[in-house]
């Protein structure tokens, strides 16, 4: 098998990169470890930055998002009963789009199928060879047969647990990491969302997030210790915890119902540098992880794709390698800014086990400052809707 760009991973990074390259006439093959059903069964991000919306439009996969997605002009940060409204539209002139990552991925699969792009599911034993040469190739097993894919470039879009990052020799890469001592227990329920905008709640009982996928499908999270397991949490226990974190009047009116999905995600901040080794380029969760508090994970993957797709097109169609030479440093500049914002939102809104009373006072003071300072609200809004690519 031969192609121009071999893409490891068929999540949002790999699919969007492939779609953007194919639209420019660049051939790709996507190698995905899981079944399509499994990829689409993952419930993850829910908020799209303004830049992500533009990229999906440029990729030609925005029609359903325009019809079914919901623009949000603001969100709330709360501290017990204090509710601080962050009006993105007023402060930045832009909204965000609430439209689930699952739907984005489904739209990308549909577009890639229409392109006739080879997406090989259930591959295994993926190994990237000679990435630091002018002729890399990938070997893998598919349907019980050993295969080889020759290519000009390899895009590592295979997430945090993939093989791409590990292909870069340990001596050639650096990792920066902060693991948080708690996770998010998330549920999906066919209930009316607690509020028409997202609520990031800081309270004496810990952090909670009230989000949604539509006006009949709610997505909620509560902070839990890393030792907790999903089976420790009945729906009733979850609803009780969520109510204890949200402002009283909202908690009192909230509709509850059976969970249709329930999972615990650990929280970490992680950056791998560099994003390139020879003709291998890392994209998305393969090279960075953010705590979901800032709604940056999926959106950061999209900005990596924004930088890399144009660089690969220039290299393959014009022989201009300036873009691929600049990719790692250019992407990392934006990655670190999103890393900072996600870390700040996480430390501002979560209780840390064993913290002193001063830490709780700092959280309260930060939220009160936001309620009184338009400048502080604008700084948060500019980061939340997404810094420029
Ligand atoms: P992904 O991990 O989505 O995709 C990588 C793909 O590569 C997967 O399909 C995997 O099967 C495949 N793969 C892995 N190893 C392979 C191999 N060796 N060979 C072939 N294929 C391989 N972000 C937010 O903004 N908000 C959220 O609320 C949020 N919640 C999250 C909850 C969880 C549990 C997780 C894990 C992440 C969450 N994220 C959230 C972040 C998430 O949305 C990621 O940023 C996003 O999926 C990044 O997309 P990819 O880079 O494509 O990585
Ligand atoms: C979600 O709806 O899943 C969601 C929204 C905002 C976040 C994290 C998750 O910051």
Image (tube, rainbow, N blue to C red):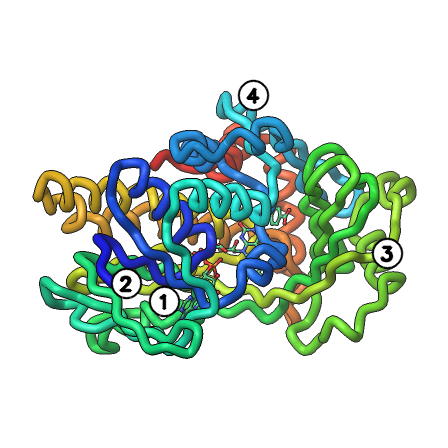
Identified at 55% across, 32% down, the residue is 96
As drawn, is 376 to the left or to the right of 328? right
| Residues marked 2 and 3 touching at CB (< 8 Å) | no
User: Residue 269, percent across and down?
Assistant: 46, 62
| Residues marked 1 and 2 touching at CB (< 8 Å) | yes
Q: Look at mark 1 in the image and give the residue it sits on.
A: 176
| Disc 3, SS | loop
User: Upstream in the sequence, badge 1 or badge 2?
Assistant: 1
> Label 4 to label 2, Cα distance in Å?
36 Å
User: Upstream in the sequence, badge 1 or badge 3?
Assistant: 1
| Residues marked 1 and 4 touching at CB (< 8 Å) | no
Identified at 91% across, 43% down, the residue is 252
| Residues marked 1 and 3 touching at CB (< 8 Å) | no
Question: Label 2 CB, ligand 1: below 8 Å?
Answer: no
User: Residue 382, percent across and down?
Assistant: 47, 33
The circle on residue 90 is: 4
User: Upstream in the sequence, badge 3 or badge 4?
Assistant: 4
Identified at 90% across, 40% down, the residue is 253
> Label 1 to label 4, Cα distance in Å?
35 Å
* Residue 379 seen in the figure: no
Label 2 neighbourhood size at 10 Å, few (<14), some (14-19), many (20+)? Answer: some
The circle on residue 273 is: 2
């Amino acid at each position: 098998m031969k192609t121009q760009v071999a893409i490891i991973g068929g999540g949002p990074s790999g699919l969007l990169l492939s779609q953007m390259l194919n639209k420019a006439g660049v051939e790709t093959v996507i190698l995905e470890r899981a079944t399509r059903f499994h990829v689409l069964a993952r419930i993850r991000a829910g908020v799209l930055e303004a830049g992500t919306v533009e990229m999906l439009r440029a990729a030609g996969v925005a029609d359903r998002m325009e019809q079914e997605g919901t623009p949000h002009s603001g969100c709330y940060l709360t501290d017990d009963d204090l509710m601080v409204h962050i009006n993105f539209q007023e402060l930045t002139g832009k909204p965000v789009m609430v439209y689930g990552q699952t739907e984005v991925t489904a739209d990308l699969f549909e577009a890639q199928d229409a392109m006739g792009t080879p997406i090989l599911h259930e591959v295994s034993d993926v190994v990237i060879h000679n990435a630091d040469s002018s002729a890399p190739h990938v070997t893998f097993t598919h349907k019980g047969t050993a295969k080889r894919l020759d290519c000009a470039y390899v895009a590592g879009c295979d997430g945090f647990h993939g093989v791409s990052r590990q292909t870069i020799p340990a001596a050639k890469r650096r990792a920066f990491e902060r693991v948080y001592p708690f996770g998010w227990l998330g549920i999906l329920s066919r209930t009316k969302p607690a509020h028409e905008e997202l609520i990031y709640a800081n309270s004496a009982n810990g952090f909670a997030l009230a989000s949604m996928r539509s006006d009949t499908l709610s997505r909620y999270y509560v902070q839990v210790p890393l030792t907790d397991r999903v089976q420790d949490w009945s729906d009733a226990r979850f609803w009780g915890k969520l109510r204890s974190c949200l402002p009283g009047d909202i908690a009192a009116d909230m509709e509850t119902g059976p969970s249709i999905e329930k999972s615990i995600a650990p929280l970490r901040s992680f950056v791998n540098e560099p994003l390139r080794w020879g003709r291998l380029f890392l994209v998305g969760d393969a090279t960075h992880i953010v705590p979901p508090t800032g709604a940056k994970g999926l959106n950061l993957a999209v900005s990596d794709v924004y930088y890399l797709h144009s660089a690969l097109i220039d290299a393959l169609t014009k022989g201009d390698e300036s873009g691929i030479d600049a990719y790692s440093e250019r992407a990392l500049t934006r990655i670190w800014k999103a890393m900072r914002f996600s870390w700040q939102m996480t430390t501002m809104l979560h209780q840390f086990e064993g913290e002193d009373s001063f830490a709780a006072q700092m959280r309260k003071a930060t939220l009160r400052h936001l309620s009184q300072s338009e400048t502080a609200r604008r700084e948060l809004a500019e980061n939340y809707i997404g810094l420029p690519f």
